[in-house]
Image: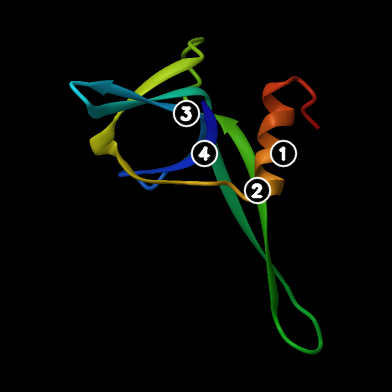
Amino acid sequence: MSIKVAVLQSGDQIIAEMKEIVSEDKPIAYLFNQPHKIVLNNQIVLSESKDQSSVEVTLAKWILISDEDDVPVSVNQVVTLVEPVASIKKMYEEKINGSDY
């Protein structure tokens, strides 16, 4: 398993440890382990020279009403999988390992 960010058909961005579920040599689903939704909060900082923007990121458990750690997601629900930036990956690892800040 490796940590990836999945962009879903719904537009949600989910970070999780992921692996492919394969049937007859074709991927049919992805198994998301401890999935968290990436929530982006845009902030605009005004300065005398020009506008600058920054993004605040928070991670929230993806499916709040379940205690399951492994969630299968059909391949047709996933638009793309990408590597997370280092800071988001570190935030996720700290959260799932119990050193949440």
Q: Distance between the residues labelled 2 and 1?
A: 12 Å
| Comes first in the chain, label 4 or label 3 | 4
Asked if residue 98 lies left or right of residue 15, the reply is: right
Say which residue label 3 marks: 18
Q: Do the residues labelled 2 and 4 touch (CB within 8 Å)?
A: no
Q: Do the residues labelled 3 and 1 touch (CB within 8 Å)?
A: no
| Comes first in the chain, label 2 or label 3 | 3
Under circle 2, the secondary element is strand
Asked if residue 77 lies left or right of residue 37, the reply is: left
Q: How far apart are marks 2 and 3 (CA)?
A: 21 Å
Q: Do the residues labelled 4 and 3 touch (CB within 8 Å)?
A: yes
Q: How far apart are marks 2 and 4 (CA)?
A: 16 Å
Instruction: Name the residue type under label 4.
Output: Lys
Q: Residues within 10 Å of mark 2 (few under 14, many from 20)?
A: few
Work out which quarter of the rendered image holds the C terminus and state it: top right
Placement of 75 over or under 79, stated as above or below = above
Residue 36 visible, this orientation:
no
Under circle 1, the secondary element is helix
Say which residue label 4 marks: 4
Residue drawn 47% across and 13% down?
66
| Comes first in the chain, label 3 or label 1 | 3
Q: How far apart are marks 3 and 1 (CA)?
A: 16 Å
Instruction: Name the residue type under label 1.
Output: Lys
Under circle 4, the secondary element is strand
Residue drawn 65% across and 40% down?
89
Q: In which quarter of the image is residue 50?
A: bottom right
The colour style of the image is rainbow
- Which residue, as the protein is rendered here, is positioned at the far left? 24
Under circle 3, the secondary element is strand
